[in-house]
Image (spheres, grey):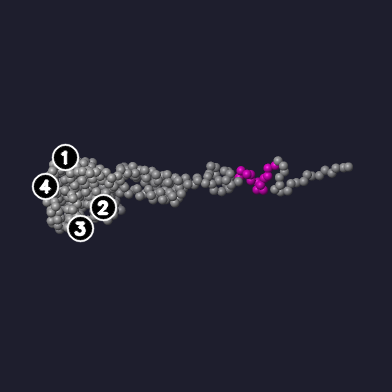
Amino acid sequence: MATTLGTPPVPPPHSSAPGLVPVAESGAGPEDEPGSGTGTTGPGSGAGAGPGRGVWRRGRIVAALALSAASVMWAHPHIPNRAGHLGSLVETFLPWTGLAVPLLLLCALLRRSATAAVAVLLPAVTWCALFGGTLVDKQTGGGDLTVVTHNVNEHNARPAHTARALAASGADVVALEELGDTAIPEYVRTLTRTHPHHSVQGTVGVWSKYPIADARPVDISPWVRAMRTTVRTPKGPVAVLVAHLMSVRFTVPSGFTTDARDAAARRLGAALSAETLPRTVLMGDFNGVFEDRALSAVTSRLRSAQAEAGAGFGFTWPASFPVARIDQILVRGVDPRSSWTLPATDSDHLPVAARLKL
Protein backbone atom coordinates (compact mmCIF):
# COMPACT_ATOMS: atom_id res chain seq x y z
CA MET A 1 0.00 0.00 0.00
CA ALA A 2 1.44 3.38 -0.93
CA THR A 3 1.76 6.24 1.44
CA THR A 4 0.99 9.83 0.24
CA LEU A 5 3.38 12.47 1.52
CA GLY A 6 2.03 16.08 1.76
CA THR A 7 2.90 19.52 3.26
CA PRO A 8 2.46 19.69 7.05
CA PRO A 9 -0.58 21.70 8.07
CA VAL A 10 0.11 25.37 9.02
CA PRO A 11 -1.05 26.41 12.53
CA PRO A 12 -3.83 28.99 12.47
CA PRO A 13 -3.09 32.54 13.58
CA HIS A 14 -2.68 33.12 17.35
CA SER A 15 -2.14 29.45 17.92
CA SER A 16 1.13 28.10 19.11
CA ALA A 17 3.10 25.02 18.51
CA PRO A 18 4.57 23.14 21.38
CA GLY A 19 7.77 24.78 22.64
CA LEU A 20 7.29 28.04 20.74
CA VAL A 21 6.83 31.46 22.30
CA PRO A 22 3.84 33.39 20.87
CA VAL A 23 4.63 36.65 19.12
CA ALA A 24 2.22 39.61 19.03
CA GLU A 25 0.91 40.69 15.68
CA SER A 26 2.61 44.06 15.90
CA GLY A 27 5.96 42.44 16.25
CA ALA A 28 6.56 44.01 19.65
CA GLY A 29 7.99 41.84 22.37
CA PRO A 30 6.98 41.68 26.01
CA GLU A 31 9.82 44.05 26.88
CA ASP A 32 7.90 46.85 25.18
CA GLU A 33 4.78 46.57 27.30
CA PRO A 34 3.73 49.64 29.33
CA GLY A 35 5.47 49.90 32.69
CA SER A 36 8.19 47.49 31.76
CA GLY A 37 10.89 50.18 32.08
CA THR A 38 11.79 50.49 28.37
CA GLY A 39 10.19 51.87 25.28
CA THR A 40 8.11 55.02 24.95
CA THR A 41 4.61 53.83 25.60
CA GLY A 42 3.57 56.57 28.06
CA PRO A 43 4.50 59.02 30.84
CA GLY A 44 6.57 57.63 33.69
CA SER A 45 7.75 54.66 31.65
CA GLY A 46 11.41 55.76 31.66
CA ALA A 47 14.06 53.77 33.47
CA GLY A 48 13.73 54.09 37.23
CA ALA A 49 10.49 56.07 36.98
CA GLY A 50 7.83 55.52 39.61
CA PRO A 51 4.55 57.06 40.65
CA GLY A 52 6.31 59.29 43.29
CA ARG A 53 9.03 60.71 41.08
CA GLY A 54 6.97 63.74 40.04
CA VAL A 55 6.72 65.10 43.60
CA TRP A 56 10.48 65.74 43.49
CA ARG A 57 10.42 67.33 40.03
CA ARG A 58 7.60 69.77 40.70
CA GLY A 59 7.82 73.02 42.67
CA ARG A 60 11.29 74.15 41.70
CA ILE A 61 10.22 77.80 41.55
CA VAL A 62 8.73 77.57 45.05
CA ALA A 63 11.95 75.96 46.26
CA ALA A 64 14.00 78.76 44.72
CA LEU A 65 11.83 81.36 46.47
CA ALA A 66 12.31 79.55 49.77
CA LEU A 67 16.08 79.58 49.36
CA SER A 68 15.94 83.30 48.49
CA ALA A 69 13.94 84.07 51.63
CA ALA A 70 16.44 82.19 53.79
CA SER A 71 19.30 84.04 52.11
CA VAL A 72 17.75 87.43 52.90
CA MET A 73 17.34 86.44 56.55
CA TRP A 74 20.89 85.18 56.99
CA ALA A 75 22.65 87.78 54.85
CA HIS A 76 20.75 90.90 55.96
CA PRO A 77 23.86 92.45 57.61
CA HIS A 78 25.56 92.33 54.22
CA ILE A 79 22.77 93.88 52.14
CA PRO A 80 24.32 97.16 50.96
CA ASN A 81 22.95 100.45 52.23
CA ARG A 82 24.39 102.52 49.41
CA ALA A 83 21.45 102.10 47.03
CA GLY A 84 18.33 103.56 48.64
CA HIS A 85 19.40 102.40 52.12
CA LEU A 86 18.05 98.97 51.24
CA GLY A 87 19.87 97.33 54.16
CA SER A 88 18.12 99.55 56.70
CA LEU A 89 14.75 98.94 55.06
CA VAL A 90 15.18 95.16 55.21
CA GLU A 91 16.35 95.26 58.84
CA THR A 92 13.40 97.42 59.86
CA PHE A 93 10.89 94.81 58.75
CA LEU A 94 13.07 91.68 59.02
CA PRO A 95 10.79 89.85 61.50
CA TRP A 96 8.01 89.93 58.92
CA THR A 97 10.04 87.79 56.52
CA GLY A 98 8.73 84.88 58.57
CA LEU A 99 5.37 85.30 56.81
CA ALA A 100 7.02 83.81 53.74
CA VAL A 101 7.26 80.42 55.47
CA PRO A 102 3.52 79.55 55.69
CA LEU A 103 2.87 81.05 52.25
CA LEU A 104 5.62 78.99 50.64
CA LEU A 105 4.53 75.88 52.51
CA LEU A 106 0.99 76.36 51.20
CA CYS A 107 2.36 76.66 47.66
CA ALA A 108 4.38 73.47 48.16
CA LEU A 109 1.28 71.59 49.29
CA LEU A 110 -0.79 72.88 46.37
CA ARG A 111 1.96 71.80 43.98
CA ARG A 112 2.33 68.48 45.83
CA SER A 113 6.06 69.08 45.70
CA ALA A 114 8.39 67.28 48.08
CA THR A 115 11.30 69.40 46.83
CA ALA A 116 9.54 72.65 47.73
CA ALA A 117 8.38 71.31 51.11
CA VAL A 118 11.93 70.38 52.08
CA ALA A 119 13.27 73.73 50.82
CA VAL A 120 10.76 75.63 52.99
CA LEU A 121 12.42 74.12 56.06
CA LEU A 122 15.46 76.33 55.47
CA PRO A 123 13.75 79.75 55.95
CA ALA A 124 11.69 78.27 58.79
CA VAL A 125 14.79 77.15 60.69
CA THR A 126 16.60 80.39 59.85
CA TRP A 127 13.78 82.57 61.17
CA CYS A 128 13.60 80.54 64.39
CA ALA A 129 17.36 80.88 64.86
CA LEU A 130 17.15 84.66 64.44
CA PHE A 131 13.99 85.41 66.39
CA GLY A 132 13.08 82.38 68.46
CA GLY A 133 14.67 83.90 71.56
CA THR A 134 12.74 87.13 71.04
CA LEU A 135 9.45 85.32 71.59
CA VAL A 136 10.53 84.00 74.99
CA ASP A 137 9.24 85.95 77.97
CA LYS A 138 12.38 87.31 79.66
CA GLN A 139 10.65 89.54 82.22
CA THR A 140 11.63 89.11 85.85
CA GLY A 141 10.64 90.78 89.09
CA GLY A 142 12.40 93.50 91.00
CA GLY A 143 13.88 96.78 89.90
CA ASP A 144 14.28 100.26 91.34
CA LEU A 145 13.20 102.61 88.57
CA THR A 146 10.26 102.48 86.16
CA VAL A 147 10.57 104.61 83.04
CA VAL A 148 8.11 105.34 80.23
CA THR A 149 8.65 107.00 76.88
CA HIS A 150 6.01 108.11 74.42
CA ASN A 151 5.84 110.00 71.15
CA VAL A 152 2.62 111.85 71.91
CA ASN A 153 2.10 113.13 68.33
CA GLU A 154 2.03 116.89 67.85
CA HIS A 155 -1.43 116.55 66.25
CA ASN A 156 -2.84 114.72 69.28
CA ALA A 157 -6.38 116.01 69.72
CA ARG A 158 -6.57 115.05 73.42
CA PRO A 159 -3.24 115.79 75.11
CA ALA A 160 -4.81 115.89 78.57
CA HIS A 161 -6.23 112.41 78.10
CA THR A 162 -2.82 111.13 76.99
CA ALA A 163 -1.12 112.86 79.93
CA ARG A 164 -3.53 111.28 82.42
CA ALA A 165 -2.85 107.82 80.99
CA LEU A 166 0.89 108.33 81.37
CA ALA A 167 0.53 109.70 84.90
CA ALA A 168 -1.42 106.58 85.85
CA SER A 169 1.21 104.23 84.39
CA GLY A 170 3.17 104.06 87.65
CA ALA A 171 6.35 105.38 86.02
CA ASP A 172 8.95 107.22 88.07
CA VAL A 173 10.24 109.01 84.98
CA VAL A 174 8.22 109.92 81.87
CA ALA A 175 9.89 111.05 78.64
CA LEU A 176 7.84 112.64 75.87
CA GLU A 177 8.65 113.38 72.25
CA GLU A 178 6.95 115.46 69.55
CA LEU A 179 5.56 118.01 71.95
CA GLY A 180 3.64 120.72 70.14
CA ASP A 181 3.79 124.30 71.38
CA THR A 182 0.07 124.50 72.13
CA ALA A 183 -0.01 121.13 73.94
CA ILE A 184 2.98 121.66 76.24
CA PRO A 185 0.99 123.62 78.89
CA GLU A 186 -1.54 120.77 79.06
CA TYR A 187 1.15 118.15 79.63
CA VAL A 188 2.83 120.34 82.24
CA ARG A 189 -0.45 120.97 84.07
CA THR A 190 -1.50 117.30 84.12
CA LEU A 191 1.80 115.48 84.65
CA THR A 192 3.23 117.75 87.32
CA ARG A 193 0.49 116.62 89.67
CA THR A 194 2.20 113.23 89.92
CA HIS A 195 5.67 114.09 88.59
CA PRO A 196 6.58 117.48 90.07
CA HIS A 197 10.06 117.77 88.54
CA HIS A 198 10.18 118.45 84.82
CA SER A 199 12.10 120.04 82.01
CA VAL A 200 11.05 120.68 78.41
CA GLN A 201 13.69 121.32 75.76
CA GLY A 202 12.32 122.08 72.32
CA THR A 203 9.97 119.24 71.33
CA VAL A 204 11.06 116.76 74.03
CA GLY A 205 10.58 116.72 77.80
CA VAL A 206 11.15 114.77 81.02
CA TRP A 207 8.81 114.51 84.03
CA SER A 208 10.12 112.85 87.18
CA LYS A 209 9.02 111.94 90.69
CA TYR A 210 12.62 112.52 91.76
CA PRO A 211 14.57 115.78 91.55
CA ILE A 212 16.34 116.52 88.28
CA ALA A 213 19.38 118.67 87.51
CA ASP A 214 21.62 119.73 84.64
CA ALA A 215 18.79 119.70 82.10
CA ARG A 216 20.01 120.90 78.71
CA PRO A 217 19.41 120.33 75.01
CA VAL A 218 21.56 117.91 73.02
CA ASP A 219 22.58 119.12 69.59
CA ILE A 220 21.49 116.49 67.06
CA SER A 221 19.54 118.62 64.55
CA PRO A 222 18.91 122.22 63.43
CA TRP A 223 16.13 122.47 66.04
CA VAL A 224 15.96 120.93 69.51
CA ARG A 225 14.86 117.28 69.35
CA ALA A 226 16.99 115.82 72.17
CA MET A 227 17.87 116.61 75.77
CA ARG A 228 19.88 115.33 78.71
CA THR A 229 19.22 115.60 82.43
CA THR A 230 20.29 113.96 85.69
CA VAL A 231 17.60 112.23 87.73
CA ARG A 232 18.58 112.03 91.40
CA THR A 233 17.06 108.71 92.42
CA PRO A 234 17.28 107.25 95.96
CA LYS A 235 19.94 104.88 94.56
CA GLY A 236 22.04 107.67 93.11
CA PRO A 237 22.16 109.82 89.96
CA VAL A 238 21.13 108.50 86.57
CA ALA A 239 21.77 110.28 83.28
CA VAL A 240 18.51 110.37 81.33
CA LEU A 241 18.56 111.33 77.66
CA VAL A 242 15.51 111.77 75.44
CA ALA A 243 15.76 111.90 71.65
CA HIS A 244 13.48 112.09 68.65
CA LEU A 245 15.49 111.27 65.54
CA MET A 246 14.38 112.58 62.18
CA SER A 247 11.55 110.91 60.31
CA VAL A 248 12.24 108.64 57.35
CA ARG A 249 10.36 108.33 54.09
CA PHE A 250 10.13 105.71 51.39
CA THR A 251 9.83 106.86 47.80
CA VAL A 252 10.26 104.95 44.55
CA PRO A 253 13.04 107.11 43.09
CA SER A 254 14.96 107.63 46.32
CA GLY A 255 14.24 104.48 48.29
CA PHE A 256 14.48 104.59 52.08
CA THR A 257 15.55 108.19 52.85
CA THR A 258 17.39 108.15 56.19
CA ASP A 259 20.32 110.54 55.74
CA ALA A 260 19.05 113.16 58.22
CA ARG A 261 18.14 110.50 60.78
CA ASP A 262 21.48 108.78 60.46
CA ALA A 263 23.38 112.05 60.87
CA ALA A 264 21.39 112.81 64.03
CA ALA A 265 22.20 109.32 65.34
CA ARG A 266 25.90 109.96 64.88
CA ARG A 267 25.69 113.20 66.84
CA LEU A 268 23.68 111.47 69.55
CA GLY A 269 26.32 108.75 69.68
CA ALA A 270 28.96 111.41 70.26
CA ALA A 271 26.94 112.78 73.19
CA LEU A 272 26.69 109.29 74.67
CA SER A 273 30.43 108.85 74.28
CA ALA A 274 30.99 112.06 76.26
CA GLU A 275 28.58 111.09 79.06
CA THR A 276 30.41 110.75 82.39
CA LEU A 277 27.74 109.17 84.62
CA PRO A 278 28.09 105.41 84.64
CA ARG A 279 24.33 104.79 84.72
CA THR A 280 22.63 106.04 81.55
CA VAL A 281 19.11 105.64 80.15
CA LEU A 282 18.27 106.80 76.64
CA MET A 283 14.61 106.92 75.63
CA GLY A 284 12.75 108.14 72.60
CA ASP A 285 11.49 107.71 69.08
CA PHE A 286 14.41 106.64 66.91
CA ASN A 287 12.42 106.21 63.69
CA GLY A 288 14.34 102.98 63.35
CA VAL A 289 14.72 99.57 64.96
CA PHE A 290 17.54 98.57 67.28
CA GLU A 291 18.90 96.20 64.62
CA ASP A 292 19.25 98.93 61.98
CA ARG A 293 22.98 99.17 61.31
CA ALA A 294 22.66 102.88 60.45
CA LEU A 295 21.95 103.55 64.14
CA SER A 296 25.05 101.73 65.35
CA ALA A 297 26.63 104.97 66.64
CA VAL A 298 23.95 104.77 69.36
CA THR A 299 23.07 101.09 69.63
CA SER A 300 26.68 99.92 69.87
CA ARG A 301 27.04 101.88 73.14
CA LEU A 302 23.81 100.74 74.81
CA ARG A 303 21.63 97.69 75.41
CA SER A 304 17.98 97.28 74.54
CA ALA A 305 15.62 96.82 77.50
CA GLN A 306 13.17 95.02 75.24
CA ALA A 307 15.78 92.60 73.93
CA GLU A 308 17.03 91.75 77.43
CA ALA A 309 13.83 91.81 79.47
CA GLY A 310 10.85 91.88 77.11
CA ALA A 311 8.36 89.37 75.78
CA GLY A 312 7.97 89.32 72.03
CA PHE A 313 8.87 92.02 69.56
CA GLY A 314 7.14 94.89 71.36
CA PHE A 315 6.15 96.67 68.14
CA THR A 316 5.10 100.30 68.72
CA TRP A 317 4.20 101.86 65.38
CA PRO A 318 1.67 102.52 64.02
CA ALA A 319 -0.50 102.21 67.13
CA SER A 320 -3.50 100.87 65.20
CA PHE A 321 -1.50 97.90 63.83
CA PRO A 322 2.13 97.97 65.01
CA VAL A 323 4.66 96.53 62.56
CA ALA A 324 7.97 97.89 63.93
CA ARG A 325 9.52 98.87 67.25
CA ILE A 326 10.87 102.34 66.59
CA ASP A 327 10.36 103.63 70.16
CA GLN A 328 13.23 102.52 72.36
CA ILE A 329 14.50 102.34 75.93
CA LEU A 330 18.26 101.74 75.88
CA VAL A 331 20.54 101.47 78.89
CA ARG A 332 24.05 101.00 80.19
CA GLY A 333 25.22 100.58 83.77
CA VAL A 334 21.78 99.33 84.82
CA ASP A 335 19.95 96.02 84.42
CA PRO A 336 16.56 95.82 82.71
CA ARG A 337 14.17 93.55 84.60
CA SER A 338 11.07 93.94 82.44
CA SER A 339 9.95 95.78 79.33
CA TRP A 340 6.49 96.15 77.82
CA THR A 341 4.18 98.35 75.73
CA LEU A 342 1.33 100.33 77.27
CA PRO A 343 -2.20 100.63 75.88
CA ALA A 344 -2.76 103.00 73.00
CA THR A 345 -3.45 106.67 73.65
CA ASP A 346 -4.54 109.28 71.10
CA SER A 347 -1.10 109.15 69.48
CA ASP A 348 0.00 107.13 66.46
CA HIS A 349 2.69 105.47 68.62
CA LEU A 350 2.32 103.12 71.57
CA PRO A 351 4.02 104.12 74.84
CA VAL A 352 6.76 101.78 76.06
CA ALA A 353 7.89 101.09 79.63
CA ALA A 354 10.74 99.35 81.40
CA ARG A 355 11.60 98.45 84.98
CA LEU A 356 15.29 98.87 85.74
CA LYS A 357 17.59 97.64 88.50
CA LEU A 358 20.03 100.40 89.48
| Residue 311 place in picture, x, y as percent | 27, 46
Q: Secondary structure at mark 4?
A: loop
What is the quadrant of residue 278 in the picture? Answer: top left
| Residue 245 place in picture, x, y as percent | 21, 49
Q: Which is nearer the eye, 51 or 26?
A: 51
The answer to whether 176 appears left or right of 129 in the picture is left
Q: Secondary structure at mark 2?
A: loop
Q: Are marks 2 and 3 in contact (CB under 8 Å)?
A: no
| 27 is within the stretch colored magenta | yes
Which label was assigned to residue 156?
3
Label 1, on which residue? 278
Closer to us: mark 3 or mark 4?
Answer: 4
Q: What is the spatial separation of the Cα atoms under label 1 and label 2, in whole angstroms?
A: 31 Å
Q: Residue furthest right?
A: 1
Q: Residue furthest bottom?
A: 157
Q: Dot 1: few (<14), some (14–19), or many (≥20) neighbours within 10 Å?
A: few
Q: Amino acid at mark 2?
A: Trp
Q: Are marks 4 and 1 in contact (CB under 8 Å)?
A: no
Label 4, on which residue? 211
Q: Magenta span covers which residues?
A: 20-32
Label 2, on which residue? 317
Q: Amino acid at mark 4?
A: Pro
Q: Which tag, 3 or 1, sits closer to the chain's start?
A: 3
Q: Residue at x 19, y 40 (%)?
A: 333
